[in-house]
Image (spheres, coloured by chain):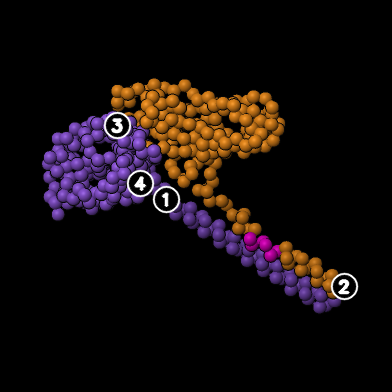
Chain colours: A purple, B orange
């Protein structure tokens, strides 16, 4: 009888210890969760143009900075290289245009402001190509890509149009809102970046800036 | 006698074993994991669903559910019938299980808008109610829904990439 009582007591003690450890582990988890929530900082700005959480800190300082436009600040850095295909399957690399001033323009057929700036880009391509300038239009459309070709032909596009992929957009900091443009100097470095539609004169000024750069 | 007296504590012991595991389920849920509706990849959405997701309706008779969506301030989305074939229409898709028959969808009247360009665009802004005509046999159903849209700002400065808003309707037909 005594032995039975001893066994029961030991078991009760064991259960009590287990309950205590369970409760204390639960409390620790709760404290850890509360600390994690307290340390969480929302870095995403609530703007219509999309956002890049890496760029928010500088957004307040300069309203015209890439950060304020929701872009990663790539100015002064070498433009990320890429090799993409045209809608008819021809491969085109950024490296093919070494020494030239390049406007990399992300666009899509469904993007009305892109359609609005397209005639400006066509005109500027025509006027500045002889000085070593080119536009590279990177389409962010989903398949089928035949519509990209049809659209570009209909608009009279006179510069290479390429089919973008996630890798390129990611390399340029995650292109979200369209149009987004990167102006690359003759030395391969990004000079200006813009998100959203800007005036034709602003585009032209930026082209003049990259034409004035020297090759490396 | 000995066996019986040992059996009861042993049973108690076994019952107590899963307690720590159960406790992990009692902890508060991560608020970031609570998706009522959302996108496939947790992407930012520019249209929100505002109507309830639980519906109770009489069975065996034609019914109309009003699904209310809201386009974020300062933005517009293309209507269900945009004026250009290149523009992405707003499209509601419902995957109705057996027992629920969706007989039609009714999109709201679109607005003709002139933004920066000369083109007239057929768009939705603000409230975006879509009527769903359906009939259901008695039962409780889960209806998966998708709203595909493409939004631009009203200054026509930036267009956001197309998005799909995923949601689930719980339909009880009595």
- Give the camera-side residue of B101 and A149: A149
Closer to the chain start, of discs 3 and 1, is 1
Tag 1 subunit: A
Of the two numbered discs 4 and 2 in the rendering, the one whose residue sits closer to the viewer: 4
Which residue was labeled with disc 3?
A: A115
Closer to the chain start, of discs 1 and 4, is 1
- Real-space Cα separation, disc 1 to disc 2, in angstroms: 63 Å
Q: Which region shows up in magenta?
A: B16-21
Closer to the chain start, of discs 4 and 3, is 3
Q: Which residue is found at the position 28% from the left and 47% from the top?
A: A91
Tell me whether circle 4 and circle 2 mark residues in contact (CB < 8 Å): no
Badge 3 and badge 1 both on one subunit? yes
Which residue was labeled with disc 1?
A: A41
- Real-space Cα separation, disc 4 to disc 3, in angstroms: 20 Å
Determine crowd level at label 2: few under 14, some 14-19, many 20+ residues with C-alpha closer than 10 A.
few
Which residue was labeled with disc 2?
A: B1
SS for callout 3: helix
- Real-space Cα separation, disc 4 to disc 2, in angstroms: 76 Å
Residue B46 lies, with reference to residue B9, above or below; the image says above
Give the quarter of the figure containing the C terminus of chain B.
Answer: top right
Query: Is residue A134 shown to the viewer in this render?
Result: yes
Determine crowd level at label 4: few under 14, some 14-19, many 20+ residues with C-alpha closer than 10 A.
some
Tell me whether circle 1 and circle 2 mark residues in contact (CB < 8 Å): no
Give the quarter of the figure containing the N terminus of chain B.
Answer: bottom right
Which residue was labeled with disc 4?
A: A165
Q: Position of residue B99 (x, y in %)?
A: 66, 34
């Amino acid at each position: 009888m005594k032995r039975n009582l001893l066994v029961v007591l030991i078991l009760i003690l064991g259960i009590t210890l287990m309950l205590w450890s369970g409760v204390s582990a639960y409390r620790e988890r709760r404290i850890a969760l509360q600390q994690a929530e307290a340390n969480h900082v929302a870095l995403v700005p609530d703007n219509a143009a999309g956002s890049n959480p890496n760029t928010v800190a500088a957004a307040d300082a300069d309203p015209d900075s890439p950060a304020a436009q929701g872009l990663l600040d790539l100015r002064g850095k070498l433009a990320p290289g890429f090799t993409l295909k045209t809608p008819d399957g021809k491969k085109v690399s950024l490296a093919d245009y070494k020494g030239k001033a390049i406007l990399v323009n992300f666009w899509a057929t469904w993007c009305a402001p892109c359609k609005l700036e397209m005639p400006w880009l066509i005109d500027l391509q025509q006027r500045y190509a002889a000085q070593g300038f080119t536009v590279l239009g990177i389409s962010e459309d989903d398949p089928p890509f035949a519509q990209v070709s049809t659209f570009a032909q209909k608009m009279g596009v006179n510069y290479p149009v390429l089919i973008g992929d996630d890798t390129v957009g990611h390399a340029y900091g995650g292109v979200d809102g369209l149009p987004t443009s990167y102006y690359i100097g003759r030395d391969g470095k990004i000079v200006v970046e813009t998100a959203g539609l800007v005036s034709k004169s602003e585009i032209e000024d930026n082209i003049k800036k990259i034409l004035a750069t020297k090759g490396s | 006698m000995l066996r019986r007296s040992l059996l009861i504590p042993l049973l108690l012991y076994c019952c107590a074993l899963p307690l720590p595991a159960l406790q992990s389920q009692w902890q508060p849920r991560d608020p970031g994991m609570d998706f009522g509706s959302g996108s496939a990849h947790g992407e930012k959405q520019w249209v929100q669903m505002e109507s309830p997701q639980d519906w109770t309706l009489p069975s065996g008779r034609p019914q109309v559910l009003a699904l209310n969506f809201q386009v974020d301030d300062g933005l517009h989305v293309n209507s269900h019938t945009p004026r250009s074939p290149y523009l992405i229409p707003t499209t509601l898709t419902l995957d109705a299980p057996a027992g629920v028959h969706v007989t039609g969808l009714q999109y709201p009247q679109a607005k003709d808008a002139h933004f920066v360009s000369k083109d007239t665009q057929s768009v939705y802004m603000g409230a975006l109610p879509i009527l769903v005509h359906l009939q259901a046999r008695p039962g409780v159903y889960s209806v998966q829904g998708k709203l595909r849209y493409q939004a631009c700002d009203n200054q026509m400065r930036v267009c956001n990439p197309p998005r799909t808003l995923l949601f689930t309707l719980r339909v009880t037909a009595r």
